[in-house]
Image (tube, helix red, strand yellow):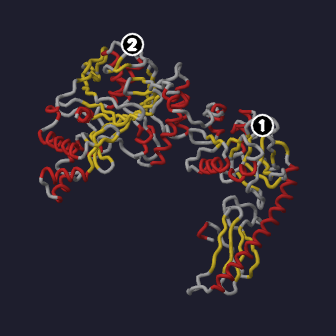
Amino acid sequence: MLEIGITPPEKIFLDGALHRFRSNTKGEGGHTDKPGWYVVFGDGVPAGRFGCWRAGVEVSFKAEMGRELTQADEMAIARRTNEARTLRDAEKKKSQEAAANTVDTIWTGCMGASPEHPYLARKGIKPNGARVTGDGRLVVPLYDEDGVLSTLQYIDNEGGKLYHPGGATGGKFNIIGNTEEPGPLYVAEGFATAATIHEITGRPCVVAYSASNIVPVVATLHTLYPDMVIVADHDASGVGQKYAEQASAKYGVRMVMPPTLGDANDYAQEGNDLAILLAPQRPPYKLNRAKLLASQPAPIKWLVKGWLQENALIMVHGPSGGGKTFVVLDWLMAIASQKTAWMAHKVKPGNAVYLAGEGHHGLRGRIAGWMHKNNVDDPNLWVSEAGCDLNTREGYKKVVEAIRALPIDPDVVTVDTLHRFMAGDENSSQDAKTMLDYCAALMAEFNCTVILVHHTGNADNSQHRARGSSAWKGALDIEISIVPAKGDTPMQIVQRKSKDAEMAAPLHASLKSVEIPGWFDEDGVQVTSAVLVQEDAPPPSATKDGKIAENQKNFANAWWSTAAEEREGKPYVSRSGFKQHLIENLGFTSNSADQYLKPGGKIISKLLVGGLIAPHEYGWVIEDGTWASCLIMDKGQR
C-alpha cells in the first residue's frame, strides 16, 4: 500500500471480508470519507486485493512463502482473488448507489450560479447550468448515458476540483448546449473548456471531466453523434493529447488541439480565434493522380530568394562573435528597407520584427551603421527592448500582444538568441518541442517566417551544427551556419538544410567598418560599427593549407573509388569504403587505416574541424558547398 501511495490502516484483518479505510490520497474528504479498501484471506497462502477508489488504483497480491506454490495453492489464490473482486464490486456499487442518492439531494438544493462567481469570472464564461453549494463552491453534474445523475464535481474559487466521495465517474459526462440542431458535437476535458467552446461556437460540448475519461465517453456517444470533434488539452506532459488521439483513432472522430500549451479556454483568453482553430482545416482525405498534382503549380515563395522562405522555420547558427547577428540583420534590413536584392538574390519587401535578447547597445550601432551605409531613413523593422521566455504561456502572450499593437503584421520574426528566449534546457527534446510548438503558433498567428539565431557547440567537430537537442534540426525548413572568418579567409554563409528546395551555393562575406554620423563617445572620438559586405569566394589554395588539400584529395579519391555515392545531393563516403580505399589503393595496414579514420585521426580531423565534411550515417558527407558542387559536376560529366 505504501509503495503505491496509499496510507494503510492501523490494523489489517485477514478475514476475507471487505474493509474500508482512510487512504489519505489526493482529495481527502471528511473524517468519515474512506476511499481505501482491502480484502485479505489469511488461510493457506495469504492473498487478496486492495485499492483506492479515489486514486483509481487496484492491486492483487499474495504472500511470499519461501517455496514454490503448488497447483492447489494457485487455484485457491485465484478463487480468493475472484471472491475479493466480487466483494469489491458489490461494495463499490453500494457506495455509488448511496452517493447517487446523496448527490441528487445536494444538486436539488443548490442554487443557480451567478456569472459573477469568482471561478466563472476568472475563466470568462457564463454559468451554463452550474450551481453553487452553501459554502460558495461551484458544483457541476455528471450523468450516465440514460441521463441519470451519477455524481457531482465541486470547484472552488481557485479552480481546485473534487468529486463527491463514492460516486461513479468512469464514462460519466455532462453536455452543455442543445443537441437537437444538426452540426458537430464537441468533447472537452473540463467544464470551463467546454463552456468556452459552446459559447464561442454555439454548438453543444460534452464535459468529460478528465483526459482518461474521454475514451469511454466518446465510445458511448460516437454512434449517436457521428460528427464529433475532440478538443484536447495541450499539456506539457502530453496526457491530454494521448487520450484524445486514442479516442480519435479508435472511433474515427476528428481531434484538434491548441498550438500552444493550455486548453481551449486559455487559448481564447489569450486573444486567439478559437472558432478558426475548431473549424475543419483540411478537405476530406483523397488521392489524386500524379499528372493532376503536377499540373497545379506550387512554387516556393521567398523573402530572400534561395535563402529565406516565406512562412518557414529557419535557424542560423554559429560560434559567439562569428558574425551571425550581422548576417541576420542584413537580411532583415534588406527586407524592411524595400531593397530589391541581397547579395544578388531577389528580395521581397516586407515588415520585420527583431526579438533581441542581448546586446541591445551594440545592436543600435549596427542598425545605425547599416542605415547610413545603405542610405535608408526609416526601415519597417521593430526591435524588442528585452528578452522573455517565449516557450511559456506568459512569454508567448507578451510577444503576441506586442506584435499585435504594431501598425503592421510581420513577414518575418527573428529570435536572437534562442538561449535568451527559452526557459528550460536546449538539450532536452521535450523543452525543444515546447519552444518549437510556440514558434509554430507564432508562424500561424501572423503567417510569417520565424528565424532562430543559435550558437554552435563548443567542440571543434561541432562547429557545423547547432548546439543542443537533435530535435531542432528535424523541425527546421532551412538551416544556415555562419563559419567565421579566419586569417585571409572571409566569413562563409552555408546552408546545411533546405527541406523544400535545392540548397543555395555558399556565400562569402566580410565585415567592413563604417562611421556613424553624429555618434561620438565621451572623449569625442567617432563611433563606428560594421556592415556586411559580400566577398568573392577565395581560391582553394588561399583557404586551405597543403595538409588539408592533401586530405581533401584523399577524401575525393575515396569517394570515386566507392561508386561516388550521394546523400541528399552531397558526396558521401562510408567509413568502411574509405578504409578499403586506404588499404587497397594506398597500401595502409588495417590498424593504420583505423587510426587515420578516427574523429581525431590525421585524415578526418582537419576536414571535420574546418567544416568541410560532417558525420552522416556510417561515414561522412561533404559540407563545403564549392567542393561538393565541383565533385557532383565532375560526376555528371563522366
Q: Position of residue 150 (x, y in %)?
A: 81, 55
Asked if the residue at tag 2 contacts the one at tag 1, i.e. Cβ–Cβ closer than 8 Å, the answer is no
The residue depicted at 33 percent of the width and 23 percent of the height is 366
Q: Nearer the viewer, mark 1 or mark 2?
A: 2
The residue depicted at 17 percent of the width and 33 percent of the height is 543
Residue beneath disc 2: 377
- Compared across the picture, whether 512 is left or right of 370 comes to left
**Numbered label tally:** 2
Q: Where is residue 612 in the image (x, y as percent from the top left)?
A: 24, 39
Which circle's residue, 1 or 2, is located before the other in the chain?
1
Q: Where is residue 181 in the image (x, y as percent from the top left)?
A: 80, 35
The residue depicted at 23 percent of the width and 43 percent of the height is 559
Image mark for residue 322:
none
Q: Where is residue 175 in the image (x, y as percent from the top left)?
A: 78, 44
Residue beneath disc 1: 115
**SS category of the residue bearing label 1:** loop
